Each structure stands twice: as C-alpha cells, then as structure tokens.
Image (cartoon, rainbow, N blue to C red):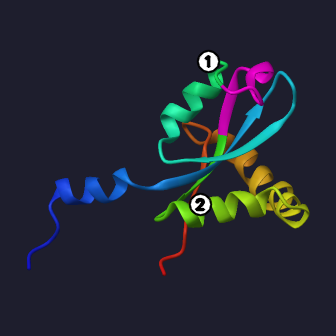
Amino acid sequence: MGPPSFAKASERHAFMNYVYIIFSNKTGRFYTGSTNNLSNRLDEHNKGYNRSTKNGMPWKLIFYASFSTEKKAIEFEKYLKTGSGKAFLYKRLVPEALKKDVVADGVARSSEASA
C-alpha cells in the first residue's frame, strides 16, 4: 500500500472535532465550546446567533484543541467547565494563549495525544 493521497488526508481532517475558547474584549468574558466546524462556529458567535455570547461580540478565538472523536471533544469541554478544569484553563491555557498573541493570527493551538 502506498502513501495516503492528499484527498484521503483532507478527508481525515474533515471530521475533526474541536474544543475552543473565545474571548470578548467587550465583556472580559471567556466562552468554552465544542464543534466540528470551528470557522463556522466562530462566525455564528460573532453574528449573534448564540444567546450565551450575543452580548459579547466581537469574539476572538484564543485557543483550540482538536480531537478525533466528538466524544473526546465533549468530555474535554465538560472537564474545562468543572472547577478543576477552570483552574487548568486559567492557569495553563488562557495565559499561554494570551502570550501567543504575537503569533500571526493570535491563536494558540493544541492537538490530542495520539492514542
């Protein structure tokens, strides 16, 4: 069997699931969510389609992590919304994301460890 084609590689990534953190300068709030289409989801937040984030527009993506399954993404999102998850988020993810603001697009990235 030969190496995977570009089409097959892009098909594998088409079904990634993401946990993301966005930040509103207007309210000073962070919002954590999960999706399988990060670009569209950020657009929805910034167009006011989500009641929870409507008042904070515009939102800036500051962190995302990719997962191979929806279940893993939802589990991580739920963890980040717990007390210890919030402590981890504010101690490790948010400061790192804000430090990486000097990166071209200002987004910190992570991927799940290969299982």
Image coordinates for residue 44, horizontal then vertical, percent: 58, 26
**Residue in the picture at 78% in, 50% down:** 94
In the picture, the disc for residue 73 is 2
Q: Is residue 51 magenta?
A: yes
Query: Going by the image, does 92 lie left or right of 65?
Result: right
**Residue in the picture at 85% in, 35% down:** 29
Sooner in the amino-acid sequence: mark 2 or mark 1: 1
Magenta stretch? 50-61
Q: Which element carries disc 1, helix, strand or loop? A: loop
The one of 36 and 115 positioned closer to us in this rendering: 36
**Residue in the picture at 36% in, 55% down:** 13
Task: Quadrant for the N terminus, please.
Answer: bottom left
Residue 22 lies in quadrant: top right
Image coordinates for residue 38, horizontal then vertical, percent: 52, 41
- Residue furthest to the left in view is 1
Image coordinates for residue 107, horizontal then vertical, percent: 61, 43
Residue bearing the label numbered 1: 47
Q: Is residue 62 magenta?
A: no
- Label 2 neighbour load within 10 Å: few <14, some 14-19, many 20+: many
The one of 2 and 38 positioned closer to us in this rendering: 38
Amino acid bearing label 1: Lys
Q: Which element carries disc 2, helix, strand or loop? A: helix
Q: Is residue 4 above or below residue 22?
A: below
Query: Going by the image, does 87 lie left or right of 54?
Result: right
Amino acid bearing label 2: Ala
